Image (spheres, rainbow, N blue to C red):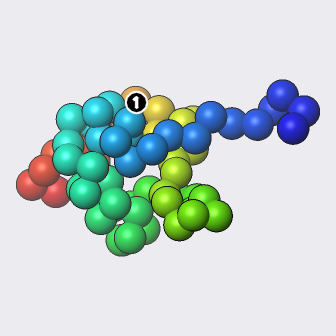
Amino acid sequence: MDGTSERLLTPGEVATLFRVDPKTVTRWAASGRISSIRTPGGHRRFREAEVRELLEGNEATADPSA
């Protein structure tokens, strides 16, 4: 790649940032709340910039009652 590639986060890393369980992050992805990329092995990865944007702009997403 040319250096402009973006860092991808695992569900566990995203869960740590939002202080939720990794399965919650997977449910968010399945419902379309956050977009994900599938690796060739079928694992989900999340764009760091999108995750940071959600953290900074929409703290309500991390609310377990939402």
How packed mark 1 is, by other alpha carbons closer than 10 Å (few <14, some 14-19, many 20 or more), is: few
Q: Look at the image and tell me whether residue 7 can be seen.
A: yes
Looking at the figure, which quarter contains the N terminus? top right
Q: Position of residue 2 (x, y in %)?
A: 90, 33
* Residue at 38% in and 70% down: 30
Q: Is residue 37 above or below residue 22?
A: below
Q: Is residue 28 above or below residue 54?
A: below
Query: Is residue 50 found left or right of 30 in the rendered image?
Result: right
* Residue at 29% in and 33% down: 16
Quadrant of the image occupied by residue 56: top left
Looking at the figure, which quarter contains the C terminus? bottom left
> In the image shown, does 57 or 62 lie closer to the viewer?
62
Mark 1: secondary structure: helix
Number of marks drawn: 1
Residue reaching furthest to the front: 41
**Mark 1 highlights which residue?**
56
Residue reaching furthest to the right: 2
Query: Is residue 55 found left or right of 5 in the rendered image?
Result: left
* Residue at 27% in and 49% down: 22
> In the image shown, does 57 or 16 lie closer to the viewer?
16
Q: Position of residue 10 (x, y in %)?
A: 45, 44
Query: Is residue 65 found left or right of 45 in the rendered image?
Result: left
Residue reaching furthest to the left: 65
Q: Position of residue 48 (x, y in %)?
A: 54, 36
* Residue at 21% in and 35% down: 19
Q: Position of residue 18 (x, y in %)?
A: 28, 37
Q: Look at the image and tell me whether residue 60 can be seen.
A: no
Give the amino acid at mark 1: Glu
